[in-house]
Amino acid sequence: MFENTQNSKIDSLGEFGLIEHLTKVFTNTQPSTIKGVGDDAAVIDCGDKYMLISNDILLEGVHFDFVYTPLKHLGYKAVASNVSDIAAMNGTATQILVSIGLSSKITLEAIEEVYAGINAACEHYKVDLVGGDTSSSQKGFFISVTAIGFVEKDKIVYRKGASKAELVCVSGDLGGAYTGYMLLEREKRLFLENPEIQPDMEGNDYILQRQLKPEARTDIIKIFDSLKITPTSMIDVSDGVSSELHHLAKQSNVGFVIYEEKLPIDQNTFDKARELGLDPTVCALNGGEDYELLFTLKQSDYDKVKNSTDISIIGYVTELEEGINMISRSGNKHKLEAQGWQHT
Amino acid sequence: MFENTQNSKIDSLGEFGLIEHLTKVFTNTQPSTIKGVGDDAAVIDCGDKYMLISNDILLEGVHFDFVYTPLKHLGYKAVASNVSDIAAMNGTATQILVSIGLSSKITLEAIEEVYAGINAACEHYKVDLVGGDTSSSQKGFFISVTAIGFVEKDKIVYRKGASKAELVCVSGDLGGAYTGYMLLEREKRLFLENPEIQPDMEGNDYILQRQLKPEARTDIIKIFDSLKITPTSMIDVSDGVSSELHHLAKQSNVGFVIYEEKLPIDQNTFDKARELGLDPTVCALNGGEDYELLFTLKQSDYDKVKNSTDISIIGYVTELEEGINMISRSGNKHKLEAQGWQHT
């Protein structure tokens, strides 16, 4: 009835195009719906504050590989990535619901480990587990996390809102999670070729943690609050800075210029990327899963962030027509595609 | 690391025991968390009202079979079953988030059909689609729906709250969804044995609709409001009346007596169950997926519901020690197990 060996139509739409395509005929009628599909979280009016809500699914074989993903870290990451979506709206996560699909291969001890990670994340981020569902999945394990949070109405930040000449900023550093992933994939390949070989993970703690146990930048939201900063637009870096810049550009109707030399890349990330034959700039732009916050600020906030060790100013906002460009170290201007950047 | 061919520990806990086991070490610290795990929906304080939130997952091969589930109905049912969870707290659903896992076999046209059903349900129940996620699932299709709703603080109804001598009531009729399921399974078996045979569905519209396109009883919530009734406890019938009575009993610390002859069973359900060699009472008690509301009322509400065609009084609340019992048509008393009732 619905089987088809080729899925060219779905592939050509892409994930974001597919959601847009499927939801374009839907109309919102509830007065409490402030923002529906198309941001990091949905926004619902509930009186004094806005409630934020997001849902993400992590699938075995797509988002994680049991060969090298510790189960406790998997539980932790599932929560952290959703808390990050709430932070990307300048909100604070307060509750989560977790539903899991259990494959027949999984043991009770394994599920307990996943929940130990979920519990560790709940304690760290001060969120309550309030619901969920378990189902036996015939085919593979997955976790679905719904995160709920709140934000003051005058503090909410959307992907929409950036204006020309504003500053483009990013928290922390970039490319570590992707470099960690590439290292894990290499070691997995070597192990599968020769199970006698012990994986070489020494000295790679930083990038491995970036991949396996990322943190949501809830601390940055607190810094905004203490510095009395409200970003004009914001998104979290789950698919890579290039992709996220395209989301901000599309929803804010602006363009961007960013500087290669301003991209914050940790030395460990840089060195390991090189060793793995990767361009550190490509890792930073395309890598994804860093769960840092990418945001725009009014120029008047410059003094508040210029000396921050947690926030880097990487460029500025331009007109829509100019598109999204990166000035390379050598001073050349390159168009940034959503899929990232290739040396030309 | 986690593989195990036998899952006896998980099986012995059961779905509800597993959730209890996994979540017992979690503690809630957010003041806005009113009710966490263990009811039809989580309850979050958001000022004037309580917000209700629930999440359910429908999995291919577990919750539905593509052989006989029309895709549009699948989308509709995924929404209706979650709207029903909100109704079970005496609330009104207002928004949903839908995440889907796409198997490589599924076409764009098939997904569009699923979303057409989701849209039809959104329009029928007046809920807005506000978010979600799509992922390519290597292994099978699934839908995860998160429903959000609201209820006045003094109108919320939990599973907890029933008291001795109150009335036990159920909306609509029971067993239709299960009988429809058994009919579809029979026709599937016959078709697989001999693909020349056309399925015999004539005259079975009612039970097929009960299985394939169930409705959430949002109309009953409106009746409660107009009659100024607030049930003392409530749950929706997703796993069968027997199982739901055990949930109400456990959380309310009560027992129940129900009468076999009072169980509302539609004539179509009754006749088809008999034809399929099933006991209609067993279908009504164990069937599940009827999405009717099972609730307890104060005796003083008796006059308000005694002549209702939408609500049946099926028994009364007893002491915890008495357990859950059914008085059969022949006047014998049978203990009702969570898994239902067997002729003795």
Image (cartoon, coloured by chain):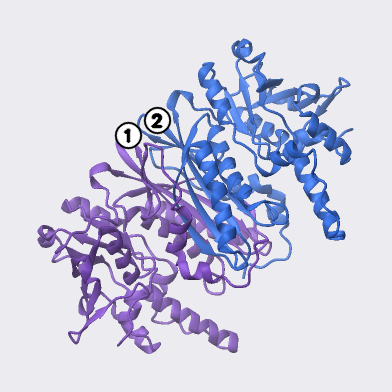
Chain colours: A blue, B purple
Residue on which the image places disc 2:
A49
- Asked if labels 2 and 1 touch by Cβ distance under 8 angstroms, the answer is yes
- Residue B268 seen in this snapshot: no
Would you place residue A311 above or below residue B190 in this image?
above
Q: Estimate the x, y position of residue A5 in percent, counting from the top left.
A: 73, 65
Would you place residue A65 above or below residue B273 in this image?
above
Q: As shown in the figure, which amino acid type bears the numbered disc 1?
A: Gly
Look at 67% across and 65% down and name the residue there. B105
Left or right: residue B329 compared with residue B300: right
Label 1 CA crowd tier, 10 Å (few <14, some 14–19, many 20+)? few
Q: Estimate the x, y position of residue A220 in percent, counting from the top left.
A: 58, 26
Task: Please report, as a chain letter, where disc 2 is located.
Answer: A
Left or right: residue B329 compared with residue B241: left
Quadrant of res A183:
top right
Q: Secondary structure at mark 2?
A: strand
| Separation of marks 1 and 2 at Cα, in angstroms | 8 Å
- Residue B201 seen in this snapshot: yes
Q: Nearer the viewer, residue A203 or B146?
A: A203
Task: Please report, as a chain letter, where disc 1 is located.
Answer: B
Would you place residue A86 above or below residue A99 in this image?
above
Look at 56% across and 44% down and name the residue there. A79
